[in-house]
Image (tube, rainbow, N blue to C red):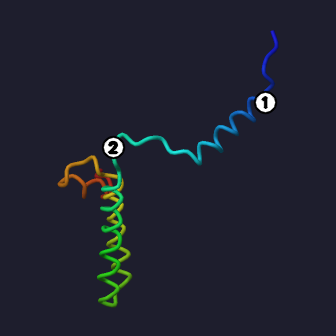
Amino acid sequence: MPRKSSGRRFAADLTHAVSSLFRLAPAPAPRWAIGLRAAVAMTVPIAVMTLLDRPDLGFQAATGAFVALYATHLPVLERPLSSSPPRR
């Protein structure tokens, strides 16, 4: 029984991997609200602190906006805990 050569298998896997970079899986629900929340959470601290002549603090505060992206499934009171270092 002939077997597929490893070169053909590699080419098929590579083709699948590259094509998957350009396809999006369907979302289970609309995600625009999460994207909008993240955009506001990043923009507001940077804009306000830049107007106050402290953009460095704005960028530092905007790093907390990643919680808006990565902890949307958590209740509001638990989100700050997701961005803090683990306790020992």
Q: Farthest residue toward the bottom?
A: 53
Q: Please tell me the numbered disc located at residue 55.
A: none
- The quadrant in which residue 40 appears is bottom left
- The quadrant in which residue 12 appears is top right
* Foreground residue among 74 and 27: 27
Q: Amino acid at mark 2?
A: Ala
Q: Residue at x 64, y 41 (%)?
A: 17
Q: Is residue 81 left or right of residue 63?
A: left
Q: Is residue 76 left or right of residue 82?
A: left
Q: Residue at x 81, y 24 (%)?
A: 5
Q: Specify which label sits upstream in the sequence, 2 or 1.
A: 1
Which element type, helix, strand or loop, lies under badge 1?
helix
* Foreground residue among 10 and 88: 10
Which element type, helix, strand or loop, lies under badge 2?
loop
Give residue 74's position: percent from left, percent from top.
24, 48
Q: Farthest residue toward the left?
A: 77
Which corner quadrant holds the N terminus? top right
1 w.r.t. 67: above or below: above
Residue underneath mark 2: 29
Residue underneath mark 1: 8
Give residue 32's position: percent from left, percent from top.
35, 55
Give residue 72's position: percent from left, percent from top.
29, 51
Q: CA distance from mark 2 to mark 1?
A: 37 Å
